[in-house]
Image: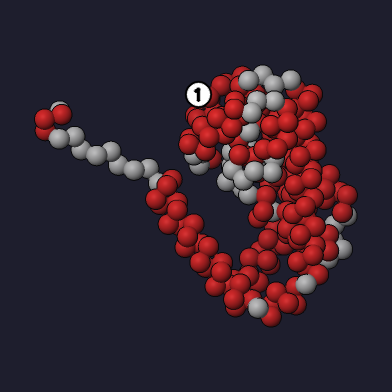
């Protein structure tokens, strides 16, 4: 079963890496690496629900990871600007359009509150620290709102994971339906990846345009 396999692999990774591994994953999540928090924090919640991890250490370690990732992105934007972001980002599957949309969001609603709100918006939360760094947002307020926003979001997903673990027998009962949904999401993701993110070949110019 796909659901059971994914769960076992995720738990095994967290069992092996511990709090440091969760911290590292959330560091990547807060940068431009393709590591969604929705794929990490619920399984951290599993660890807490199983009694393997302490709730507060789980929240603390993942919040530290979010701060580290956001801070690294801030420094890249601050000291390297957009050229360095794009240079580094190509190794982490950076989508330039997502970055540009985040920049537009940041400049349209510029301010500390914007950085806080961005922590709850898909895609934008991965990139918001970059324009904050480019715009030289004051460091202390940036760290405060990033910590508060990321902690709220991480804790929400962690609690969702704990609740899911508590009702795991129900999930297993309907696991076949869940597997179908997962396969459908994977197929949709592959189509989206090929259509939107795969580099498109440049069209050949007409003879008259050469």
Give the image location of residue 94, x and y in percent: 51, 38
Q: How is the image coloured?
A: secondary structure
Query: Which of the two residues, 58 or 174, is positioned nearer the viewer here?
Result: 174
- Residue 13 drawn above or below residue 112: below
Tell me which corner region of the image, top left, top right, bottom left or bottom right, holds residue 143.
top right
Q: Residue at x 77, y 33 (%)?
A: 145
Placement of 94 over or under 142, stated as above or below? below
Residue 178 appears in the figure: yes
Q: Is residue 15 visible from the viewing direction of this image?
A: no
Q: Residue furthest left?
A: 208
Identified at 79% across, 50% down, the residue is 155
Q: Secondary structure at mark 1?
A: helix
Residue 111, image quadrant: top right
Q: Which of the two residues, 23 or 198, is positioned nearer the viewer here?
A: 198
Q: Quadrant of residue 73?
A: top right
- Name the spot of residue 95 as percent of width and height, x first: 49, 39
- The quadrant of the image that shows the N terminus is bottom right
Residue drawn at point x = 11 percent, y = 30 percent: 208
Residue 176 position in % (x across, y down): 60, 78
Q: Residues within 10 Å of mark 1 (few under 14, many from 20)?
A: few
Q: Please state if 188 lies on the left or on the right of 168 as rendered.
A: left
Q: Position of residue 115 (x, y in %)?
A: 69, 32
Quarter occupied by the C terminus: top left
């Amino acid at each position: 079963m796909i659901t059971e396999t994914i769960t076992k692999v995720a738990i095994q990774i967290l069992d092996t890496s511990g709090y440091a591994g969760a911290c590292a994953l959330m560091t990547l999540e807060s940068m431009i690496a393709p590591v969604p928090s929705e794929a990490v924090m619920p399984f951290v919640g599993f660890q807490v629900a199983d009694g393997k991890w302490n709730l507060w250490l789980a929240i603390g370690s993942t919040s530290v990871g979010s701060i580290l990732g956001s801070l690294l992105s801030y420094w890249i934007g601050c000291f390297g600007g957009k050229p360095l972001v794009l240079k580094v980002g190509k190794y982490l599957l950076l989508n330039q359009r997502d970055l540009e949309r985040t920049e537009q969001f940041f400049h349209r609603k510029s301010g500390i509150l914007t950085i806080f709100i961005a922590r709850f918006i898909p895609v934008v939360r991965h990139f918001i620290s970059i324009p904050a760094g480019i715009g030289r947002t004051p460091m202390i307020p940036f760290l405060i709102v990033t910590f508060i926003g990321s902690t709220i979001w991480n804790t929400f997903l962690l609690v969702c994971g704990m609740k899911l673990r508590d009702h795991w027998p129900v999930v297993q009962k309907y696991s076949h339906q869940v597997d179908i949904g997962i396969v459908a999401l994977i197929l949709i993701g592959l189509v989206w990846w090929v259509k939107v993110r795969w580099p498109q070949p440049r069209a050949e110019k007409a003879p008259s345009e050469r």
